[in-house]
Image (cartoon, helix red, strand yellow):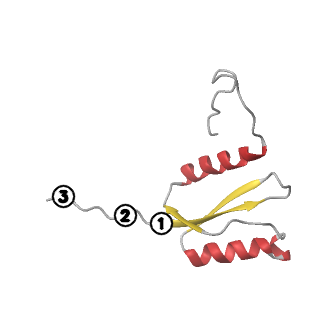
Amino acid sequence: MARRYRDPTPCFAYIQQGGTSTEYYLHAFDTAAEAENGRRDCGQDVGGGFNTTRVVAIPALTSEQLDAIEELIQQLDNPHRAATAQDDPPVPNT
């Protein structure tokens, strides 16, 4: 008989556009309600009036994994094409 594993507990996340059109930030919460409240706060004057994606359920991640994803998202403002991997090696998450 196959062993059944529970699905990992989800977290709820959205991406916020920052102070410029090319800044992006990842926000993750334990509940969908917390994420939706955070997303709505971002869009109001009190929260800066920033655009956001919709809230999406994702597998729960460690803070280090979330930091790595946010680092990748922040690179959206600096896309470029490297001729080879040696021209643009991966940068360690610090």
Dot 1: what SS? strand
Amino acid beneath label 1: Pro
For the residues labelled 1 and 3, the Cα–Cα distance comes to: 23 Å
For the residues labelled 2 and 1, the Cα–Cα distance comes to: 8 Å
Q: Residue at x 64, y 27 (%)?
A: 89
Dot 3: what SS? loop
Q: What residue occupies the far left of the structure in this picture?
A: 1
Residue under label 3, please give it. Answer: 2
Residue under label 1, please give it. Answer: 10
The circle on residue 89 is none
* Crowd tier of the residue under label 1, counting other residues whose Cα lies within 10 Å: few below 14, some 14–19, many 20 or above: some
Q: Give residue 86's quadrant in the image.
A: top right
* Crowd tier of the residue under label 2, counting other residues whose Cα lies within 10 Å: few below 14, some 14–19, many 20 or above: few
Dot 2: what SS? loop
Amino acid beneath label 2: Asp
Q: Which of pointers 2 and 3 lies earlier in the amino acid sequence?
A: 3
Q: Residue at x 59, y 79 (%)?
A: 33
Residue under label 2, please give it. Answer: 7
The reply to whether the C-beta atoms of the residues labelled 2 and 1 are less than 8 Å apart is yes
Q: Which of pointers 1 and 3 lies earlier in the amino acid sequence?
A: 3
Amino acid beneath label 3: Ala
81 with respect to 66 (left or right): right
Give the x, y percent position of residue 64. 56, 49
Q: Give residue 25's quadrant in the image.
A: bottom right
